[in-house]
Image (tube, rainbow, N blue to C red):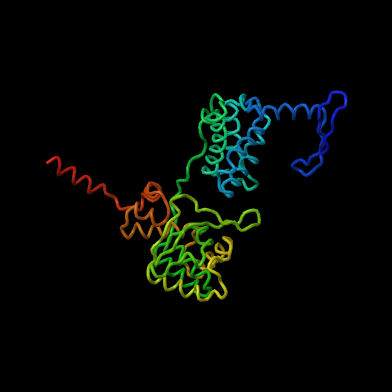
Amino acid sequence: MSAYKDKKTGKWFVFFYYRDWQGKNKGKTKREALEWEREFKQKQQLNLDMSFENFVEVYSNDMKARLKLNTWLTKENIIQTKLVPTFGSKKMNEIRPADVIAWQNKMLAYKDEKGNSYSETYLKTVHNQLSAIFNHAVRYYELKSNPAAKAGNMGKAQTKEIEFWTKEEYLKFSEAMMDKPLSFYAFELLYWCGIRLGELLALTPADFDFEKGVLTINKSYQRLQGEDIITEPKTAKSNRTIQMPEFLCEEMKDFLKLLYGCKSTDRIFPVTKSYLHHEMDRGAKTAGVKHIKLHSIRHSAISLLIDMGFSAVAIAERVGHESIDITYQYAHLFPTKQMEMAQKLNAERG
């Protein structure tokens, strides 16, 4: 990049090359330079005559610092691969509901090389991100309306039945994992405490208080862009202490004794999610139990607590969830009260 002053006008100018998204060197032509200047002024003035792609930069600057890195990277991937290619060059204040509907139709018609379509959940997620960008423009930059909201959503929230292991299935699995202590103890914590995978992988010896029998959850682990990242837990509710059953306290004491030279702030499970995925597949096959996803260990833990008769509020407090989410996601597992309600209403009627 070079800057120079025009001797006749006294104005400063900048001339530069840049690399495009394919890594090729590019220079600015006069037409491109004038267009760049126009768009730069629009962004400074927050003029919604700017392109969607340029507003994405504004949106990114506003939102990136407010979100966890892994959350932002997911949003950014959707924006750059599913939204910018279609809406990038269109002006923010000229995008109509009809444009959104046309884009939706392409998304709905998409098939990959194997003939698979996008899932209903993914379609809903992508549309929600588009709508979030327009909502941001409406709320903070005086865009008149949200064309994505007017067009209506596509796809739907996940409605698949939750998969889980019964206690008997988990015990068979855990027995098969005893040949590898690290794997065995990792799954013991996941199942008996119902913690999230990122919470497990962030645990240190300092998080255990064996005198009180509690485990403190106050951080989460992510592997992002080739680096180990320790962040705040998923939500404010996720910061919690969990009372461990006595047998689990004894197991974890034994495990920590095996970790020679482990400092109080060192991760006690210095492995990846991929490792645990592989170990879960291995253990399920050895034990002869049905295959479920790694996250479904958490579903299994919650299902056990429901079966034991605990309320949604009590379960939510233990697993770091909102009680309304527990009620909604696991409603089919809670004992029905319909017969009891009918009987009491009958008694009231006399």
- Residue 80 coordinates in the image, percent (x, y): 65, 40
Residue 346: horizontal and vertical position, in percent?
16, 43
Q: Is residue 339 left or right of residue 76?
A: left
Q: What residue is rendered at 29% in x and 50% in y? A: 336
Q: Is residue 49 visible?
A: yes
In the figure, 174 relative to 64: above or below? Answer: below
**Relative image position of residue 282 (x, y in whole percent):** 54, 67
Residue beneath the point at 88% across and 27% down: 7
- Please, is residue 321 above or below residue 8 in the view? below
At 58% from the left and 61% from the top, the residue drawn is 274
Q: Nearer the viewer, residue 192 or 85?
A: 192
Q: Where is residue 96 in the image (x, y as percent from the top left)?
A: 58, 25
Question: Looking at this view, is 19 or 173 the one in front?
Answer: 19
Say above or below: 300 vs 138: below
Q: Pick the quarter of the image with the N terminus.
A: top right
Q: In which quarter of the image is residue 170?
A: bottom left
